[in-house]
């Protein structure tokens, strides 16, 4: 019984460190939804909670390693008994095609049930256009985008053939009447489509981006996001511990072992040790991206 | 200068060939202020490991050989009438020691096991009207032989739950067996010299309690334990909340042994099997389908996402 009570108090201590919120809405959107490559656009996270809340700082952003961060603005407004938290990120895409962003998350105690919860916004897919014609990220998107082009070409071709047929009829008619040859108009050829190749980012680029994100915001939340990103780089699953990952690290990824260890420390060490642990991570990043 | 747990670890490994996991388990039990159950076939250094731990810590050591005719008074002590002084004197039993080896604990009947396990939980013994506090540290290391079950009394689950962890000792590898031959064929197995004291053990415990345990890892521990309680045709009862606390304490002890002042998910995952394996009641279906409790627990642990 005493052990059970101790366990309950242990869990309640953990829950007490989280804010009590009554979350109404949590959305994640892009403006515009299909930005052009190289052009800045905005990602907006909007969180609506019931009641007056003075500050919200538990929102964890998804990894934006495929986008270049240009600015981050947070606002809190209070309206009709609700608090609206908006975070606007100005970003720029450096490659074309589909970019899938994970949901933003929020750790809080649900004021209705008193239970610690992790809220998630919707995930987001951004289709980055690369000039006049869009490149294809997948076979499905290629078919989806080429279909209207082929339909248009077919429509033009049918129209042109109809006109040619009418002209031929007219020419035949005139030939029969005037006995003069008539030249047909040349048929236009197919429109050439030039596709931009999808640029696959290298391991070094992804690590460099992660290091930039960590340097820009050296917090526990970012450390954990970066840790997830680096673990995914070496193919770690959600059910593997660091020892599992290190045990089956390929020779190509062997140099990432110190970085993985440093990120593990930064993710789980005490708050006092966190700055030093993050510096170790940054040094480890420098080693592998040199 | 206080000695560290690594000094004891080195001393134990100098005496015991192989069995590294057992050595680590014994140290974790000492640091986490718990008791350990050692299971393995005869002659694989179970008793030696316990004696070596006591010798390296300069701790008082008592061995109790459990037999079917053992009585509770043989363990906790008794009151004897002194005719000269015309009063009863208390004679304390072998339980009053820093490290107690309960050899073949399952050979004694339930009332004797209960007397021992009450001492393990309360850390005191009551003889007649007097209660006597047991020394600190007080570590019970109980052994069981899984091969010879004739004339044994199975420990009830509630009593098994009192053990912080269960250490399974296997046979040594061929190389280790050759080394045992080279070292001890014509010599007595030497016990290690004293390298630490019981005061050091108390200091390690204080250090272990100060080790940072992240909130996300608390959730992971609870997820692991609740995973054992999910409805399954193979399980009658899952691990108790005492197992949850044991996981936290053992993970802290492991982090201390690794020289860290914070716990990683790997610490929890590594101690999960020894902490949980003796606390779960399985159905006979598990045996009928040629599965083992260890494989079921490993599969369940592997299914829980790591933070």
Image: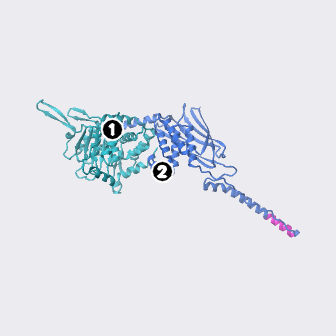
Q: Image check: B2 left or right of A287? A: left
Colour approach in the figure: by chain
Q: Which residue is mark 1?
A: B33
Q: Residue at x 31, y 38 (%)?
A: B195
Residues rendered magenta in the picture:
A165-176
- Please count the marks in the image: 2
Q: Main secondary structure of the magenta part?
A: helix
Q: Quadrant of residue B251?
A: top left
Q: Chain of mark 1?
A: B
Q: Secondary structure at mark 1?
A: loop
Instruction: Please state which of residues A158 and A283 is positioned toward the viewer in this rendering.
Output: A283
Residue B193: percent from left, percent from top: 28, 40
Which tag is nearer the camera, tag 2 or tag 1? 2
Q: Position of residue B107 (x, y in %)?
A: 23, 48
For image coordinates 31% across by 37% down, the residue present is B196
Chain containing mark 2 = A
Query: Which residue in the protein does label 2 denote?
Result: A249
Bin the neighbour count of mark 2 within 10 Å (Cα to Cα): few under 14, some 14-19, many 20 and up: some
**Chain cyan in the figure, letter:** B
Q: Nearer the viewer, residue B6 or B202?
A: B6
Magenta stretch encompasses residue B61: no
Residue B204, position as x, y percentages in the image = 35, 36
Residue B85 spot, x, y in % from top left: 12, 29
2 and 1 marks on the same chain:
no
The blue chain is: A
Q: Is residue B171 visible?
A: no
Q: CA distance from mark 2 to mark 1?
A: 36 Å
């Amino acid at each position: 019984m005493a052990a059970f009570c101790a366990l309950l108090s242990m869990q309640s201590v953990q829950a007490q460190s989280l804010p009590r919120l009554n979350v109404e809405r949590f959305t994640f959107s892009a403006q515009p939804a299909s930005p052009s490559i190289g052009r800045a656009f905005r990602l907006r996270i909007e969180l609506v909670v019931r009641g007056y809340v003075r500050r919200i700082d538990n929102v964890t952003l998804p990894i934006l390693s495929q986008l270049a961060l240009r600015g981050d603005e947070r606002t809190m407004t209070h309206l009709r008994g609700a608090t609206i938290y908006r975070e606007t990120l100005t970003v720029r895409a450096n490659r074309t095609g589909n970019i899938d962003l994970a949901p933003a998350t929020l750790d809080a105690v649900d004021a209705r049930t008193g239970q610690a919860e992790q809220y998630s916004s919707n995930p987001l897919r951004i289709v980055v256009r690369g000039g006049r014609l869009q490149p294809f990220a997948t076979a499905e998107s290629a078919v989806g985008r080429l279909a209207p082009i082929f339909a248009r070409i077919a429509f033009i071709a049918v129209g042109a053939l109809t006109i040619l047929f009418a002209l031929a009829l007219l020419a035949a008619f005139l030939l029969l009447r005037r006995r003069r040859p008539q030249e047909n108009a040349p048929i236009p050829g197919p429109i050439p489509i030039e596709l931009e190749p999808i640029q696959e980012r290298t391991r070094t680029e992804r690590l460099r981006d992660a290091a930039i994100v960590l340097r820009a915001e050296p917090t526990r939340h970012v450390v954990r996001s970066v840790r997830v990103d680096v673990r995914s780089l070496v193919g770690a699953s959600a059910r593997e511990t660091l020892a599992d990952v290190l045990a089956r690290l390929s020779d190509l990824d062997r140099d990432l072992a110190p970085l993985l260890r440093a990120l593990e420390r930064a993710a789980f060490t005490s708050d006092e040790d966190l700055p030093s642990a993050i510096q170790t991570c940054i040094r480890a990043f420098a080693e592998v991206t040199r | 200068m206080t000695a560290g747990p690594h000094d004891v670890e080195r001393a134990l490994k100098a005496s015991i060939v192989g069995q590294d996991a057992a050595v680590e388990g014994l140290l974790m039990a000492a640091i986490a202020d718990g008791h350990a159950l050692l299971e393995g076939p005869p002659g694989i250094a179970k008793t030696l490991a316990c004696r070596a731990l006591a010798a390296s810590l300069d701790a008082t050591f008592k061995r109790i050989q459990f037999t079917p005719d053992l009585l509770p008074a043989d363990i906790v002590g008794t009151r004897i009438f002194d005719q000269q002084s015309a009063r009863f004197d208390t004679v304390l039993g072998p339980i009053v020691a820093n490290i107690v080896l309960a050899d073949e604990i399952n050979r004694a009947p339930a009332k004797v096991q209960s007397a021992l396990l009450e001492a393990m939980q309360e850390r005191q013994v009551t003889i007649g009207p007097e209660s006597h506090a047991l020394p600190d540290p007080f570590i019970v290391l109980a052994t069981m032989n899984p091969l010879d079950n004739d004339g044994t009394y199975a420990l009830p689950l509630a009593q098994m739950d009192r053990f912080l962890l269960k250490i399974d000792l296997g046979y040594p590898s061929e190389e280790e067996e050759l080394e045992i031959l080279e070292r001890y064929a014509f010599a007595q197995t030497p016990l290690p010299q004293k390298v630490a004291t019981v005061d050091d053990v108390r200091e390690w415990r204080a250090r272990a309690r100060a080790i940072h345990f992240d909130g996300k890892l608390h959730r992971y521990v609870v997820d692991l334990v609740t995973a054992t309680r999910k409805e399954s045709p193979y399980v009658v009862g899952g691990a108790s909340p005492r197992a949850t606390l044991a996981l936290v304490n053992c993970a802290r002890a492991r982090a201390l042994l690794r020289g860290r002042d914070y716990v990683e998910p790997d610490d929890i995952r590594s101690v999960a099997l020894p902490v949980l394996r003796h606390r779960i009641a399985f159905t006979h279906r598990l045996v009928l389908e040629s599965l083992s409790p260890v494989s079921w627990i490993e599969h369940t642990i592997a299914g829980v996402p790591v933070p």
